[in-house]
Amino acid sequence: MQKVPSGRGGIDFAEMKATTSLEATCVVCGGHGRPIADGRDYLYRTTRRAFQLRRCAQCKGEYIAPPLSAEEVVTFYPTTYYSYQEGGESFFAQLREDVVDSAYGKAHPRGVRRLLVAVGKRFLDGVPLRIFGEGRFLDVGCGSGANLKLLARHGWKAEGFEIGAANVRDDNIHVAPSLADANIVGSFDYVRVWHVIEHVPDPHGFLETLRKLTDKQGRVVFGLPNCGSLYARVFGRYWYNRDIPRHVFNYRPSTLRRALADHGFDVTRMTFRSCGGLLGSIQHILNRGGRNIDLINRSILVLLFWPFDLLCDALRVGDSIVVEARLKNEGQPSRPRFHRGTLTNR
Ligand SMILES: [Zn+2]
């Protein structure tokens, strides 16, 4: 989730040792968490501090203990944090545009571009493709709002939320310290929550707000890391998608399913979508002594390692999951508003 960069410029070499707290319980289920490792910020090195990781004995979620204060958390997001770097002209921004436009029949790429669009589509699960109509779309953690602009031109009434000091920008982006504080009005047909929930310190408050914002027949689509993945088990504290200390709580599929059920959501689809976790974890191990080797930003290496990611996904032990959830239909048979290619029942 994009954070407002701290005025400290990111790097904080304060020597602080994490204190252990026996009272640090799981924020998802209230269960007891057993310490599994101490880990550091291996990616951005915003601090030299060690953070204790715990795994909940009940829901198997993994979290940093003791919990971090809001003031601390902002210091762990450097100005170079990846979601600040949304280049409108980059190759990937253009590819995203091509994927959406071709899905809605407004572009017809050929040759290599067509192949790239087919591959790119795999990573756009959180964006509604080929659902036509006047639906309302909410992008939670929308960054600069690239998805909003893209979907608005295909008929969606699109709004976004981004964390920060409270205001509403002209381009339908609500900015507030939390989703609940944003006072977004009405309910949405499609809510995208992309690599956000693992940053949220109060998941139940967050999910309850999402419940209120979701239309009775709408859907919420989450993208998040899977701490039950093969790479998470093999690499432990060095697992790339553990992203200490920015991910305050990492979920397994069953952990998220349980949390969603508490707020009236049923999981209707779950797929695995890994990319780069193996290479990133190897990078963390190589850099643990203070080196600064960058593997993850070399596209050719990411491509070379991608078959391993695909294999993990096929075996359902992949690094990242896409979870679609809908509100339970209180006694009524589930009758989705959306069908592929059309928006019905409005
Ligand atoms: Zn738990």
Image (tube, helix red, strand yellow):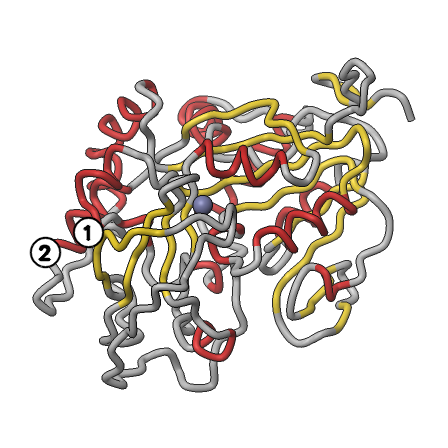
Q: Where is residue 117 shown, x and y percent of the image? A: 48, 29
Q: Where is residue 150 shown, x and y percent of the image? A: 67, 44
Pointer 1: residues within 10 angstroms few (<14), some, or many (20+)?
A: some
Look at the picture and state if 36 lies above or below 271: below
Q: Mark 2–mark 1 contact, CB under 8 Å?
A: yes
Q: Residue at x 39, y 72 (%)?
A: 76
Identify the disc placed on residue 286.
2
Apparent side of residue 257 relative to residue 210 in the rendered image (left or right): left
Ligand 1 picture quarter: top left
Look at the picture and state if 62 lies above or below 342: below
Query: Alpha-carbon distance for marks 2 and 1?
Result: 10 Å
Q: Residue at x 8, y 66 (%)?
A: 289
Residue nearer the viewer, 269 or 26: 26
Residue at the far top in the pictured view = 333
Q: Considering the numbered disc 2 on the image, is that residue within a helix, a strand or a loop? A: helix
Q: Considering the numbered disc 1 on the image, is that residue within a helix, a strand or a loop? A: loop
Q: How many marks?
A: 2
Residue nearer the viewer, 260 or 45: 260
Identify the disc placed on residue 295.
1
Q: Residue at x 40, y 26 (%)?
A: 112
